[in-house]
Amino acid sequence: MPGLMSRLSLIFRAKFSKALDRAENPNETLDYSYEQQLQQLQNVKRGIADVTTAKKRLELQYASMQQQVDKLDGQARDALKANREDLAREALTRKSALQTQLQDIMAQGQQLEAQQQKLVEGERQLQAKVESFRTQKEVIKAQYNAAEAQVRISEAATGIGEHMADVGLAIERAKDKTQQMQARANAVEELTASGALEDYTASGDDIDRQLKQISQSGQVDDELAKLKAELGQGEAPKQLEGGDAAEPAPAAEPSQASEEPAS
Amino acid sequence: MIVRLLGEGQFRVPEDLLARLNELDDEVLRAVENGDERALWDGLQALAEAVRSAGTKLGDDELVPSDAIVPPEDLSLEEARDLLADEGFIPDIAVRR
């Protein structure tokens, strides 16, 4: 069974030699092939532009999610100041989950960046190759007889076709990657925007699982303790000056007394 | 021998590298069979590295088909299986070397 490497070159060859083998007039084939290359070059440029646009959109979304992280952090502080540890914990849990997602998206973004640089380089190479083909085809037209020209040009066209397929594949992969990242970013954004974390427990998706892990791990506890320390609240949270509605009024009559006769 | 690293370009490598490349290619195949993505990436990376270090990059204006093509280093298992499943419409002929 042939390996991946040889199999791949078979796939590429099969794709690009068929059309040329069928052609009868070398000169016509040359011009036709060149036109096709110019068209492909345009497609490649468009493809790269699409990927770039999608990536920019993603960067904007990333920035707004980063703001959301800051906001949740502020909310946790406010909640603690108001002695609402439960709310602070909730905010920190969400913040932590969001941060995990953001780190993943960031790592994927870096991969995408590398792919994109290769794309641009591939396009530059293709441009040079198409130009080289143009020159070669004029030389071949002038100097070689039909049979010889056919052989020469079919090698050149297969070579250039291979490169076009290479760049095309790279664009497809970059597009796929952008779409995956977009889908993930959308899911996270929706989750944090809706505030309805419970709705997602049923689906048992990735984020939900992570949320559970985080709240089970000491991560949120640690951050909560850190926040408390920052706000000057020790082990036992002290009361804020403004007083608290939940604090029992000293003059209140024992409530049990009035409740017991009701049975 | 001409080898293309997908997404990177073509390299001219000495013929005697073929045995080593075939070895690494077999490792890649085994990784796919075992469903081991980490091993697949390691194998592809080793392949690409062998080609880069022993080969010289072709000029931009050179128009030649490759004798072998190395998939991108971050190929997923799923993508690798798709490539291997193409047996149906790709004739199983020997590659010119």
Image (cartoon, coloured by chain):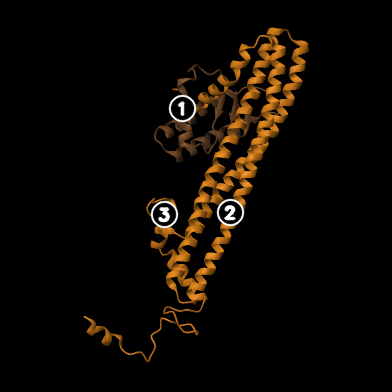
Chain colours: A orange, B brown
Q: Nearer the viewer, residue B87 or B11?
A: B87
The outermost residue toward the front is A262
- Could one spot residue A178 in this view of the protein? yes
How far apart marks 1 and 2 lie (CA) works out to: 37 Å
Q: Quick check: B93 above or below B34?
A: above
The kind of residue tagged 3 is: Tyr
For the N terminus of chain A, which image quadrant? top left
> For the residues carrying marks 3 and 1, which lies nearer the camera in this image?
3
**Mark identifier at residue A173:** none
Q: Position of residue A5 (x, y in %)?
A: 52, 27
- With A124 as the anchor, is A197 left or right in this view? left
Report crowding for label 3: few under 14, some 14 to 19, many 20 or more residues within 10 A (C-alpha): some
Q: Quick check: A32 above or below A44?
A: above
Q: Quick check: A209 above or below A151?
A: below
Mark 1 lies on a secondary structure that is helix
Q: Which residue is mark 1?
A: B84
Q: Which residue is mark 2?
A: A62
Write down the quadrant of residue B27 in the picture: top left
How far apart marks 3 and 2 lie (CA) works out to: 22 Å
Q: Residue under mark 2: which chain is it in?
A: A
The kind of residue tagged 1 is: Leu
Mark 2 lies on a secondary structure that is helix
Q: Which residue is mark 3?
A: A200
Q: Residue under mark 1: which chain is it in?
A: B
Q: Nearer the viewer, residue A169 or B84?
A: A169
The kind of residue tagged 2 is: Tyr
For the C terminus of chain A, which image quadrant? bottom left
Q: Do dots 3 and 1 share one subunit?
A: no
Report crowding for label 1: few under 14, some 14 to 19, many 20 or more residues within 10 A (C-alpha): some
Instruction: Tell which circle, 3 or 2, labels the residue nearer the N-terminal end.
Output: 2
